[in-house]
Amino acid sequence: MNLILFGPPAAGKGTQAKRLVETRKMVQLSTGDMLRAAIASGSDLGKRVEGIMQRGDLVSDEIVIELIESRLPEAEAAGGAIFDGFPRTLAQAEALDVMLKGRGSQIDLVIRLKVDDEALKQRIAGRFAESGRPDDNPESFGVRLGAYNAQTAPLLPYYQGQGKLVEVDGMGAIDAVAAGIDAAMDAVR
Ligand code: AMP
């Protein structure tokens, strides 16, 4: 199964994706993690994206589409991908559909984790204090939330139109959210 975990930054996508890697042996494809790895390695790509990410802006569609494409065979071999933080624009969503179709595959389910903006801001303040992730500072987080609302949230009708969108309340405890995700996935099988 190919699943998109959809939602604003700090909605819990990464936490839930990691759990699914454990419980369902799927492969997590997080473009944010891939880009942070590129920065940590000091590669040319890392140097190109570092400032953009620190501000909270989106990097170009071409970059993230290429990153995802390079990892699709691995996810296929594992029996499924969890797309985490991708797609974030309509161009990315369309490219993903084309790439998967070319491989005889498709997105099976899009789970939207719903969390309100106030809760997100509180979560992120805690995470910034703990991890010191540079783009979790209040200013960059505001830009990231703005990018989500302007460029990513408009994808919801795209997936709703395909009949793939399921909403899960992301405000509860991690286990309660996980149960909602499991129920949505089991309903597709
Ligand atoms: P994340 O870890 O998913 O919150 O991503 C961290 C940052 O990486 C984002 O704020 C963007 O700057 C960049 N990024 C990650 N995924 C994407 C994507 N699909 N499209 C554009 N930029 C992305």
Image: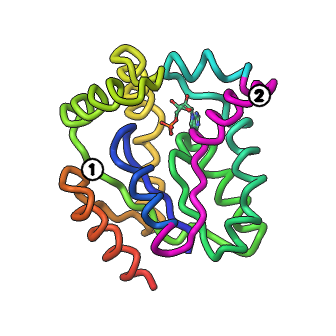
The quarter of the displayed image where residue 72 is located: bottom right
Residue 102 x, y percent position in the rendering: 78, 67
Question: Left or right of 10: which side holds 43?
Answer: right
Residue 57 x, y percent position in the rendering: 53, 22
Quadrant of the drawing holding the N terminus: bottom right
The residue at the point 71 percent across, 33 percent down is 38
Residue found farthest to the bottom: 189
**Please, is residue 152 above or below residue 134 in the view?**
below
Residue 77 x, y percent position in the rendering: 72, 74
- The mark found on residue 114 in the picture is 1
Residue 161 x, y percent position in the rendering: 44, 62
Q: Is residue 40 magenta?
A: yes
Magenta stretch, main secondary structure, is: helix
Q: Is residue 47 magenta?
A: no
**Structural distance between the alpha carbons of marks 2 and 1:** 32 Å
**Please, is residue 90 above or below residue 189 in the view?**
above
The residue at the point 45 percent across, 73 percent down is 23
Quadrant of the drawing holding the C terminus: bottom left
The residue at the point 57 percent across, 48 percent down is 30
> Which residue is denoted by mark 2 in the rendering?
45
- Determine crowd level at label 2: few under 14, some 14-19, many 20+ residues with C-alpha closer than 10 A: few
Question: Left or right of 121: which side holds 92?
Answer: right
Near-viewer residue (123 or 69)? 123
Give the extent of the magenta segment: 22-46
